[in-house]
């Protein structure tokens, strides 16, 4: 129901993200780093071979493929053939694929595809065509049939038309539609196919624009809903709102029509659709959200009826409305109204996040006046009343700091321990760990550390999807798994929590980390049932979930570049995660490029310093070399103080120097809390929070202290998700 926030990745500049890519780009996707280790229990002896590179596992796979038994032998043969095909050793691959479709029935269609492709690579068209026809006869409903139809269509175009009708969601068919649109750019049916099934395309919006421009009078309400969803997924909310306005009125389409117009700077039309929503579907969840939006609009709630309704149905959002009105009253200097609104928030709405935020503001103000007991009292109130609010981790850490000022040493220590136990993934957990004497570094002792991961990556079974998808994913065949998921994932507009988690896991494995990490990090918003809550809790206890959120992406390249620059490799990885979500070709609206978001002019300046001609900033090794050099440079400006260096990386050295001239700082925790730019303050916390998560997930000494249950699983325990009951796809 909410628009996906445009992911604010902050670095040398603030990003307005855009991705590049043309044609059948999905064929060339590259995974982020090596495949993760697959759990031993479901895969047996093939499990330790899955994460290894092809040359390093070939001998072991050959041994298992020759002497193994049953499914173990079949899996080894499948992996061995896959490796050989990628190396161009087609004839040897065919030897291992011989009769494998009979011995490995779960992946029989995929085996036949591999055999056909091997014959095609050898120029044996007749043998390949026989296999393609075999797939159509025996596996007509499987995604492999889309590959067969595409291959056969090169000789007879009627097969392509069949593919477009029968497998519109298959990536091969989507690519086919793109190819045909080059010859017929405004073909309505092809453009609609992309609108419905091409939301993964980086260049989808021009297709949507052509569809609306040339065929608006011939589109049905169902078509408009699909178009609206596609625009929404691409975060182009104005056109999305206009498309949803022509869809069949439902709670969702009316809400998105309203919100899209609002985000598209058309508040008058937004107001009209919000009013239609609450009038036509007053009891829907979307109507509750609509009342919240109306209560925030200047002309949306003249008689306060929407706010009164929210007070009953959604106190959290009612409190957000009051918090906005409190901010407006403060700016206008209406002191009586300020006092009344504060009292209402802290009494009637005391358990809401807005009340927690107000308490946190008051606590910081008290601390600024050195009223330590008052500040401590307000921080404790947040932990007692609002323990799940976004401000609770900060309250817990600073409660400890203020307790120290009062010489309450035991209370301070207990507060730090509570932060580590209750908010283990937060930036403040890193600060608390340092206060407790853990070897996790500090602001001034971080950049030169050289921590190396000592725990292996782990994976976990998918919580949704067909048996074929799950098997491909476990075997580390992530590209094939992604293709299968495009067919399995049929409820894209209303995904279950399990579907959203699966979508996130699969996307990350094929390098779609921007969207994949968003899907995984926003799972809590998808909880609707007790079963969802149970699954979410299981995921939170699984190391594979956390390691997918914090992947060792580009680790060999990162380690090499960081070593050359003399900077902490995990800090580099943490910065990269915040800057680009590991997208190597990503560009900001200001022109910053690549993994560490380096501006071209900055790259040229660095190249001059290094005495080299230039950098190719969309090439990971070049980008990492430039970015790590600049990270070392910003540290050199500030005596290796990472708080200042990261602030400089984001806001620019000039701004940080100006802040330092305004005041002499000795407490760098206080500096982080008072960074003048909210964007930069968030950035510094986010990067250092990322660093902490890499430590607690991949360093055995820290993991065993911070979250031993994750370490036990990483050392070979059974991943939680692999014990889930079969999904709705299972036969």
Image: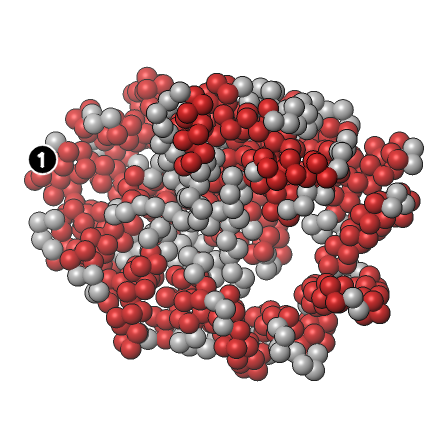
Regarding residue 520, the answer to whether it shows in the image is no
Q: Toward which corner of the image does residue 95 lie, by quadrant?
A: top left
User: What residue appears at the point 84 percent right and 69 percent down from the top-left corner?
Assistant: 336
Q: Nearer the viewer, residue 143 or 331?
A: 331
Q: Nearer the viewer, residue 618 or 316?
A: 618
User: What residue appears at the point 60 percent right and 47 percent down from the top-left corner?
Assistant: 679
Residue on which the image places disc 1: 124
Would residue 672 appear left or right of 373 to someone viewing this image?
left
Would residue 214 appear left or right of 583 to someone viewing this image?
left
User: Number of marks in the image?
Assistant: 1
Would residue 393 appear left or right of 20 to someone viewing this image?
right
Q: Toward which corner of the image does residue 141 lie, by quadrant?
A: bottom left
Element on which disc 1 rests: loop
Q: Nearer the viewer, residue 573 or 195?
A: 573
Residues packed near mark 1 inside 10 Å, few (<14), some (14 to 19) or many (20 plus)? few
Instruction: Please state the horizontal and vertical placement of residue 437, each as a whole percent of the image.
Output: 76, 24
User: What residue appears at the point 70 percent right and 65 percent down from the top-left corner?
Assistant: 324
On screen, 431 above or below 25? Answer: above
On screen, 23 above or below 12? Answer: below
Instruction: Please state the horizontal and vertical placement of residue 639, each as a whole percent of the image.
Output: 65, 23
Q: Nearer the viewer, residue 605 or 339?
A: 605
Q: Toward which corner of the image does residue 385 lie, by quadrant?
A: bottom right
On screen, 491 above or below 522? Answer: below
Instruction: Please state the horizontal and vertical placement of residue 12, each as a whole percent of the image.
Output: 51, 39
Regarding residue 151, the answer to whether it shows in the image is yes
């Amino acid at each position: 129901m909410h628009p996906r926030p445009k992911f604010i990745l902050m670095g040398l500049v603030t990003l307005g993200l855009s991705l590049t890519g043309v044609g059948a780009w999905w064929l060339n996707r590259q995974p982020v780093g090596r495949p993760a280790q697959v759990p031993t229990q479901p895969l047996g002896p093939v499990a330790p071979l899955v994460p290894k590179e092809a040359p390093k596992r070939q001998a072991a796979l050959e041994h298992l493929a020759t002497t193994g038994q049953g499914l173990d032998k079949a899996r080894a043969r499948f992996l061995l053939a896959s490796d050989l095909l990628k190396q161009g050793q087609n004839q040897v691959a065919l030897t291992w694929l011989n009769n494998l479709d009979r011995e490995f029935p779960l992946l029989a269609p995929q085996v036949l595809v591999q055999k056909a492709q091997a014959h095609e690579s050898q120029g044996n068209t007749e043998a390949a065509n026989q296999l393609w026809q075999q797939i159509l006869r025996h596996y007509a409903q499987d995604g492999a049939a889309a590959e067969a139809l595409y291959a056969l269509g090169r000789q007879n175009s009627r097969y392509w038309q069949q593919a477009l009708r029968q497998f519109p969601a298959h990536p091969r068919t989507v690519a086919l539609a793109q190819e045909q649109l080059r010859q017929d750019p405004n073909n309505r049916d092809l453009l609609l196919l992309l609108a419905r099934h091409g939301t993964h395309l980086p260049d989808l919006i021009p297709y949507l624009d052509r569809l609306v421009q040339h065929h608006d009078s011939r589109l049905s309400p169902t078509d408009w809903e699909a178009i609206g969803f596609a625009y929404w997924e691409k975060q182009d909310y104005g056109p999305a709102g206009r498309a949803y306005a022509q869809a069949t009125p439902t709670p969702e389409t009316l809400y998105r029509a309203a919100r899209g117009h609002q985000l598209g700077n058309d508040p008058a039309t937004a107001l009209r659709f919000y009013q239609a929503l609450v009038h036509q579907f007053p009891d829907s969840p979307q109507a509750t959200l609509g009342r919240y939006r109306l209560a925030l609009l200047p002309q949306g709630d003249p008689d306060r009826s929407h706010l009164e309704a929210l007070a009953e149905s959604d106190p959290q959002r009612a409190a957000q409305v009051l918090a906005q009105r409190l901010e407006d009253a403060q700016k206008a200097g209406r002191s009586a109204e300020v006092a009344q609104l504060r009292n209402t928030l802290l009494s009637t709405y005391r358990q809401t996040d807005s009340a927690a935020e107000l308490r946190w503001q008051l606590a910081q103000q008290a601390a600024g006046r050195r009223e330590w007991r008052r500040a401590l009292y307000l921080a404790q109130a947040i932990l007692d009343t609002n323990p799940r609010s976004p401000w609770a981790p900060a309250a817990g850490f600073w409660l400890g700091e203020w307790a120290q000022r009062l010489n309450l040493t035991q209370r301070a220590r207990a507060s730090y321990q509570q932060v580590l136990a209750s908010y283990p993934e937060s930036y403040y957990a890193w600060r608390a760990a340092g206060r407790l004497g853990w070897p996790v570094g500090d602001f001034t002792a971080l950049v030169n550390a050289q921590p190396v991961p000592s725990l292996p990556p782990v994976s976990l079974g998918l919580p949704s999807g067909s048996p074929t998808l799950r098997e491909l994913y476990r075997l580390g065949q992530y590209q094939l798994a992604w293709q299968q998921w495009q067919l399995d994932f049929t409820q894209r507009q209303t995904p279950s929590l399990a579907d959203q988690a699966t979508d996130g896991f699969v996307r990350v494995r094929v390098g779609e980390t921007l969207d994949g990490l968003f899907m995984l990090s926003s799972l809590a918003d998808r909880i609707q049932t007790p079963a969802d809550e149970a699954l979410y809790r299981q995921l939170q206890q699984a190391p594979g979930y956390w390691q997918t959120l914090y992947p060792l992406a580009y680790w060999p390249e990162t380690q090499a570049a960081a070593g050359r620059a003399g900077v902490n490799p995990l800090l580099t990885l943490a910065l990269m995660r915040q800057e680009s979500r590991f997208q190597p070709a990503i560009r900001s609206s200001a022109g910053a490029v690549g993994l560490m978001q380096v501006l071209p002019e900055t790259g040229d300046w660095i190249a001059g310093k290094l005495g080299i001609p230039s950098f190719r900033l969309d090439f990971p090794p070049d980008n990492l070399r430039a970015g790590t050099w600049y990270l070392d440079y910003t540290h050199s400006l500030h005596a290796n103080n990472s708080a200042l260096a990261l602030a400089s990386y984001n806001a620019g050295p000039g701004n940080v120097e100006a802040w330092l001239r305004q005041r002499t700082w000795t407490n760098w925790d206080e500096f982080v809390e008072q960074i003048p730019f909210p964007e930069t303050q968030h950035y510094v916390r986010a990067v250092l929070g990322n660093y902490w998560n890499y430590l607690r997930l991949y360093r055995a000494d820290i993991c065993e202290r911070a979250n031993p249950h994750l370490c036990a699983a990483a050392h070979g325990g059974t991943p939680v998700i692999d014990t889930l009951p079969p999904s709705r796809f299972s036969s």
